[in-house]
Image (tube, grey):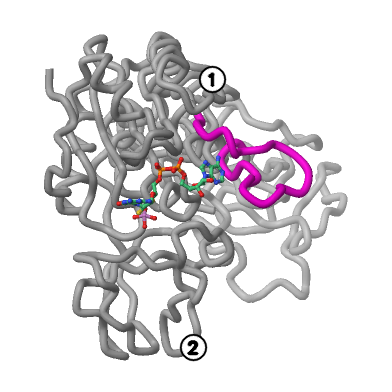
Amino acid sequence: MTAPAVNSPPTDWFEARRRAHRAGEAARTPTERVPLESALGRVLAQPLIALCDVPHAVTSAMDGWAVAGRGPWRLRELRAVRGSTETPALRHGEASPILTGGVPPAGADAVLRSELGVLSLGADGRTKLDTAPHAPAGEPAPGRHLRPAATEAARGETVLPAGCTLGPLHLALAAACGLDTVDVVVRPTAALVRTGDEVVDSGIPRPGQVRDSFTLTLPPLLAALGARVGNNEKAPDDLAATLAALRAAAGRASLVVTTGGTGRSGADHVRAALTALRAEVLVDGVAVRPGAPTLLARLPGGALVVALPGNPLAALLSLHTLAHPLLAGMQGLPLPTLGRVTVAEPIAPPGAPLSLRPYRLGPLGALPTAWHGSAMLRGLAEADGVLLVPADGAASGTQLDTLPAFR
Ligand SMILES: Nc1nc2c(c(=O)[nH]1)N[C@H]1C(S)=C(S)[C@@H](COP(=O)(O)OP(=O)(O)OC[C@H]3O[C@@H](n4cnc5c(N)ncnc54)[C@H](O)[C@@H]3O)O[C@H]1N2
Ligand code: MOO
């Protein structure tokens, strides 16, 4: 058993992320095969490989006539056939009507688009096709309006890498490549345990009360990071209740996220509950502000616990620190990368080894928010991103690492 040591030194922020990622990797979720219609937002477990050439055959890019040789042409049939490789080959001097996306008969060497052709009755009593008087000289040039097969992808080609989070365009691409199902990562399950007797769910909070910030934020934000949030329990500020809520959540989910109660006051029970559950504490406080009391632990049954501080900004930024890398690891994704931005005004030393500061983008770069108090929401609610401000602060024009603003 590794009990949370009293006042153990906080873990470096970058190291805390790496530990969270490694803990996630050690608890990787399996994969499953799902129909394309159910795959939106899922993480691809295997590279997506085209099952056919795309396009599958040479196709016409225009409505008109497939033609062989130079005009005028004898029209072989009056109605377009949408596409069959069994259509007899065109002979030199013949044309056959074709629709956009249709497969031209063998022997066709171009498509004359409908606007540029004129039909008339030939001397032999058969329908004749000429290029219209207004058609550009030389129209149609060989190959005109014929889309060669496999120009977008060849059968067997990888069109999306593993780890891609599937959006609508990816799904349409998979369909175009002939797939009906995809192999995706099973979503990690998450459960919330919110502590705090002062937390209320509706109305104007009385002095000493606070409206809950987490039921409205954590389920959708965790879902955006790939988790499926099942339970969301509220535990009173009491050790037995906190212990029972944690135990129940760990029985239902592979990731338990708690809020509040990370301190060492008589009303804070998360540490004591983790000790009682014989948790292995992987991160006991992080050298960052806000979010210093954040904990990461593994329960004997394997469930991972991210204990977020009760202050809303501290908690939501700690989601970046620990839950994002952790969930990335569980889904076989790399440690999330940091962005980079130029700061538009000087930032004073934050009084901590590292400070996470929401910012808005102005014409000259990042403008750190004034609403960066640990208990605030306003700065993050309107942020374009989050700055990583080092202990010395930053001069105007300096480049700093950034995190995305999950909001
Ligand atoms: N003596 C010390 N006091 C504090 C320290 C310290 O080092 N020594 N650290 C401060 C820091 S930093 C933080 S962050 C908080 C951490 O507090 P806890 O995780 O124990 O959280 P609580 O005490 O339960 O609540 C803190 C704050 O957050 C509000 N809260 C809680 N739940 C919610 C919710 N669901 N929605 C909105 N707001 C919530 C709660 O009412 C408190 O105001 O400790 C500092 N103190
Ligand atoms: O570190 Mo606390 O998390 O500032 O608010």
Tell me where residue 393 sits by quadrant: bottom left
The residue depicted at 39 percent of the width and 45 percent of the height is: 319
What's the mark number on residue 230?
1
Marks 2 and 1, how far apart at CA: 42 Å
Say which amino acid is labelled 2.
Answer: Pro
Residues packed near mark 2 inside 10 Å, few (<14), some (14 to 19) or many (20 plus): few
The foreground one among 78 and 249 is 249
The foreground one among 32 and 57 is 32
* Residue 197 located within the stretch drawn in magenta: yes
Residue 299 screen position, x and y as percent: 25, 17
Residue designated by label 2:
363
Tell me where residue 339 sits by quadrant: bottom left
Which is more N-terminal, label 1 or label 2?
1
Is the C-beta separation of discs 2 and 1 under 8 Å?
Answer: no
The foreground one among 79 and 287 is 287
| Viewport quadrant of the N terminus | top left
Residue 354 screen position, x and y as percent: 24, 65
The residue depicted at 43 percent of the width and 47 percent of the height is: 315
SS at mark 1 in the image:
strand
Report whether 75 appears left or right of 189.
right
Say which amino acid is labelled 1.
Answer: Gly
Tell me where residue 284 sits by quadrant: top left
The foreground one among 323 and 207 is 207
The residue depicted at 30 percent of the width and 70 percent of the height is: 340
SS at mark 2 in the image:
loop
Asked if residue 97 is positioned above or below residue 269 in the image, the reply reads below
Highlighted range, magenta: 194-215
Residue 179 screen position, x and y as percent: 48, 23
Report whether 340 appears left or right of 344.
left
Residue 204 screen position, x and y as percent: 76, 49
